[in-house]
Amino acid sequence: MARSEAEKRRIIEEADSQLALPWMTWGELDRLSPRERSHEYQKFTQPVMTYLGRHKTCKLPACRRARACKGFISETQYQQGGYHDAFPPCLGKGTLPHDQALAAMDEIYGRAAAPDDTPKYAGRASDRAADSDETS
């Protein structure tokens, strides 16, 4: 069944109203330029760099003074390449691996770990007792 134009608009508006970052929806984020979007992502990852202690050895004096990550990739670094545009410059060329930063992000922002294969429910105690009697 084909969707009407009104239904298509409603679906897009619903998706745009979902949070992309704690302070910004997907619609607001999509309207930003790539450079502004990078700036917003860096604001989201700065607490992760602070958690990892990257501010202690950062090249930027502002980060060391504030005792927290406050850095943003400069226009020169952005054009030069080698920097991930979602992370501050302290996660640049040849520094901390991104997988450590992503693992720390999971700890800070509480993303659930991958589900394990162990069953959550072991069954009734009476069933377990009956199974152990049959095997004896």
Image (cartoon, rainbow, N blue to C red):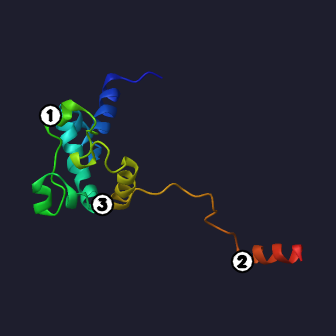
Above or below — where is 49 with respect to 14?
below
At a point 25% along the width and 57% down the height, the residue shown is: 54
Mark 1 surroundings within 10 Å by alpha-carbon count, few (fewer than 14), some (14 through 19), many (20 or more): few
For residue 76, the mark is 1
Could you tell me how far apart the alpha carbons at marks 3 and 2 are, in whole angstroms? 45 Å
At a point 34% along the width and 27% down the height, the residue shown is: 8
Give the amino acid type for the residue marked by disc 2 in the picture. Ala
Camera-side residue of 96 and 14? 96
State the SS at label 1: helix
Camera-side residue of 65 and 116? 65
State the SS at label 3: loop
Mark 2 surroundings within 10 Å by alpha-carbon count, few (fewer than 14), some (14 through 19), many (20 or more): few
Could you tell me how far apart the alpha carbons at marks 3 and 1 are, in whole angstroms? 25 Å
Q: Which residue is mark 2?
A: 125
For residue 52, the mark is 3
Q: Position of residue 119 (x, y in %)?
A: 64, 63
Give the amino acid type for the residue marked by disc 1 in the picture. Thr
Above or below — where is 5 with respect to 103?
above
Q: Position of residue 72 (x, y in %)?
A: 16, 45
At a point 34% along the width and 29% down the height, the residue shown is: 7
Give the amino acid type for the residue marked by disc 3 in the picture. Leu
At a point 32% along the width and 22% down the height, the residue shown is: 5
